[in-house]
Image: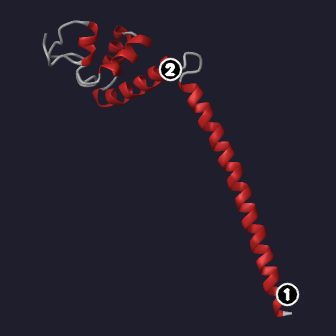
């Protein structure tokens, strides 16, 4: 057993070649990361995707794939779309609350200015 194998090669129970496409993105101390991706996308598909991407964008793609796969494992029906929907609902609620608060501020400012005007008369 080679202790320097990446998490992907450990999971797939194979030797980790020097030019392993997975090694830079799946360190041996984080096996769960590859397990999620493998379960949803499969090792071959992920390998093909990474090979088609420029090297400078691969790490970000792996993080995105990992997030999406983890969400899909945790919520097979909605996946990350469920999280996006919840966040959009929170944004809408917050925007409504902000609009109400801004309206209350305007009303308070008007009352304050009317009180100041009535004191001068």
Are the residues flagged by discs 1 and 2 in contact, CB closer than 8 Å?
A: no
Residue 79 visible in the displayed image? yes
Residue 41 visible in the displayed image? no
Side of 112 relative to 3 (left or right): right
Above-or-below relation of 101 to 38: below
- Please report the residue visible at 24 percent of the width from the left and 12 percent of the height from the top: 9
Above-or-below relation of 95 to 53: below
Above-or-below relation of 48 to 96: above
Judged from this view, the residue extending furthest toward the bottom is 121
Residue position for label 1: 118
Residue position for label 2: 74
The secondary structure type at the circle numbered 1 is helix
Above-or-below relation of 113 to 8: below
> Percent x, y for residue 106?
75, 68
- Please report the residue visible at 59 percent of the width from the left and 21 percent of the height from the top: 78
Quadrant of the rendered image containing residue 76: top right
The secondary structure type at the circle numbered 2 is helix
Quadrant of the rendered image containing residue 10: top left
Q: Label 1: few (<14), some or many (≥20) within 10 Å?
A: few
Image quadrant occupied by the N terminus: top left
Q: Which is nearer the eye, 21 or 79? A: 79
């Amino acid at each position: 057993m080679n202790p320097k194998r990446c998490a992907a090669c450990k999971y797939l129970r194979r030797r980790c070649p020097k030019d392993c496409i997975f090694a830079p993105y799946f360190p041996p101390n984080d096996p769960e990361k590859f397990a999620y991706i493998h379960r949803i996308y499969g090792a071959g598909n992920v390998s093909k995707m990474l090979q088609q991407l420029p090297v400078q964008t691969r790490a970000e793609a792996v993080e995105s794939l990992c997030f999406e796969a983890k969400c899909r494992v945790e919520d097979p029906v909605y996946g990350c779309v469920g999280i996006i929907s919840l966040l959009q609902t929170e944004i809408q609620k917050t925007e409504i609350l902000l609009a109400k608060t801004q309206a209350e501020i305007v009303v308070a400012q008007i009352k304050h200015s009317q009180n100041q005007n009535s004191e001068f008369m």
